Amino acid sequence: MRLAEAWRVALDALRANRLRSALTMLGVIIGVASVVILVAIGTGTKQKVEQQVEGLGSNLLLVVPGRIDVGSAPALSPLTLDDVDAVSRVVGDPDRVAVTVASGATVRAGARSDFSTVQGVLETTPAVFTRELARGRYLTGSDVDTSRRVAVLGASVARALFPDRDPVGQQVTVSGVRFRVIGVFAPLGQSLGVDRDDEVHVPVTAAQRLYGTQRIDGIAVKAPDRERIDELGGRIVAELTRRHPGTEFSAVTQEQILGVLGDILGILTGVLAAIAGISLLVGGVGVSNIMLVSVRERTREIGLRKAVGARPRDIGVQFLLEAVLLTSIGGLTGMALGVGTALTVAAVSPIPAAVTWWSLALAFGVSAAVGIVFGVVPAQRAGRLDPVVALRSE
Amino acid sequence: MTAPAIEAVDVSRTYQLDGVSVPALRGVSLTVAPGDYVALVGPSGSGKSTLMHLLGGLDRPTGGRLAIGGREVGSLSPGELAALRNETIGFVFQAFHLLPRTSAVDNVALPLVYRGVGARQRRERAAAMLGRVGLGHRLDHRPNQLSGGEQQRVAIARALVTDPTVLLADEPTGNLDSVTGAAVLELLERLNAESGVALVMVTHDHEVAARARRRIAMRDGVVVADSADERHDPPVSAGTGRPDTLVPAPSAESRSASGSGPGHPSGGTGGAAGATGRRAGEGPAGDAPAVPADEEAVP
């Protein structure tokens, strides 16, 4: 029998039992759709994270105490502003070095308040990280040197505290200390799960006084070029280790952060896809089941086909194609449903979703393979039926 | 003399049912010549359906030698056997066995599908064949839109569309009223005469059997009479040729005589062995309602 003929026969058989075919496909449809959706969400999240890490600025080197690794706890920082000066000397350009000492604090303005992250920073921050102002000005070197109590508000802080006024020139209170607002950031959105519009930047010296500490949490360096970034990191770490014997420091690049995050998100996406894959497997079992029923129901037809000259292989191929057709059509429908849902989710919710071609190809391939795997047993059973017995069946 | 279309030598078929061997055929020898017109008669469980399945290559003997179209059945794989059926055998069943939801022309074309004939040629040949059975105006009707007689004509067209050498018909008129049945029978006879296809027909109907040029009577898994033998050797069974008389009285020699051909007063109902054979035959060959087995053969 020609293969084209076998496809036609298989399609006819599916048409003859439309409802049953549709219900059988549903298992595959749901399985494929969930694989596509979950992989899309995983991929979308990863892409967004990458964008955000890259959006911090280019050629960034983050220097923190301890090791940056999956599962390691943040260490208490021994770094001080003296270390920052030392790092600046290593880098050779103080404008490329930024610091942060951050703490959550309630910021008040009149009767309104907002819980935000108050960061003590140097005036170099906008040059090192990518930050743009919507209004006013940023901190200056003299603000930092004189511990001036001035603050630059994140977009959402500004909106919360001064919904109807220009915040610039207004007063805010952080832990009972008054600060004058000199600028407002342009909105940035979320980055790595942190609302970056919820930040309030104050001079690092003022923040240290506010918190009663000399420490700083971390140093960020904008390397002059990408090629020498690892070497520069090594020198910075060496200098800091010399200054703080016995303490470990890490200088991580964006690539390294992305690598670590990518690994985590990759595992997460894999787990989600595997769970969705299980439903695809269950769908496959359903196909197998229905094909067995179909073989039994059509035993007489099989007997007749054999009587008029169908070889066991012809019958086997016919039923195998039927199973593959079931899962392939289910797979295509599931793909369409998955893509549609993923795009809708991405459009109407904050959950990012990016449909990738490879996930579609994989989902379709897997669904067709499921048809083959779960169609083989019923097909073999059909092919091996004794024509005499088959013809006599009810 | 042309080569026989089918040649069976001492063919037996034993079924294994729950570990028990039950013989359905116990040594049958016969040849079907090209253009033959044979009626296969015998009571239910006599093994005629089993023999029919063997002659049609649907089943393989467990003993003896069976050649269809000169090819030894025992040495063929299921796939080769299927191809052999496709090339040499046409089947007509009592229950028609047409595919539902499939037009008459597609039903008729079905054997050609497995022969690898292209769609257009299939349709042409199937339509021509339907024309020969008088259904040229019913090409695209589905089985449920056709009468019983028309359905059986479609089945006959399907059996003959491959130009087989042997047409095996299992109770072809069994599901039809007498008028329709007679018309179908006439059609089969006409096709037999016109195209030279050998017609082997299993029947319970004595009137039907009486029309055949040759009658083979079976009982308890053996051939008890073959009118072809009578012509060569008249004294054996001085019968009239009517099928009733082709079944001799029970004989103690039944087993040793089975299938040994002319010259023996062969019979098959003798003793316990016969009873076993009959019961056994009903399992695999249970094509008939539960009537007393001997009723029709010996009225």
Image: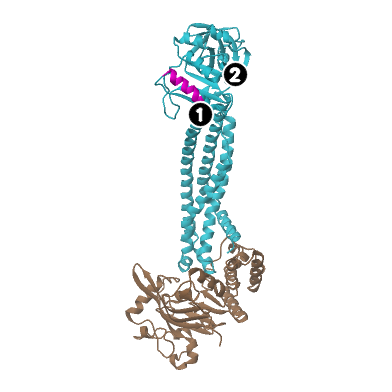
Chain colours: A cyan, B brown
Compared to residue B218, the image places residue A50 above or below, namely above
Which SS class for mark 2? helix
What count of labels does the image hold?
2
Quadrant position of the C terminus of chain B in the picture: bottom left
Q: Does residue A235 show up magenta in the picture?
A: yes
Name the kind of residue labelled 1 in the image.
Ile
Q: Is residue A46 visible?
A: yes
Residue behind mark 1: A257
Residues in magenta, as a range: A233-244
At which x and y percent is residue B240? 48, 89
Name the kind of residue labelled 2 in the image.
Ala
Main structural element of the magenta stretch: helix, strand or loop?
Answer: helix
Which SS class for mark 1? helix
For disc 2, the chain is A
- The quadrant in which residue A92 appears is top right
- Callout 2: few (<14), some (14-19), or many (20+) C-alpha neighbours within 10 Å? some
Compared to residue B216, the image places residue A297 above or below, namely above
Q: Which residue is painted at 57% across and 20% down in the image?
A: A128
- The quadrant in which residue A3 appears is bottom right
Residue behind mark 2: A127
At which x and y percent is residue A279? 47, 43
Q: Does residue B193 show up magenta in the picture?
A: no
Compared to residue A382, the image places residue A99 above or below, namely above
- Callout 1: few (<14), some (14-19), or many (20+) C-alpha neighbours within 10 Å? some
At which x and y percent is residue A272? 48, 38
Q: Which residue is painted at 56% across and 88% down in the image?
A: B1
Q: Nearer the viewer, residue A333 or A73?
A: A73
Q: Is residue A118 visible?
A: no
For disc 1, the chain is A
Task: Give how far apart the Cα atoms at labels 2 and 1 are.
Answer: 20 Å
Chain-order first, disc 2 or disc 1 = 2
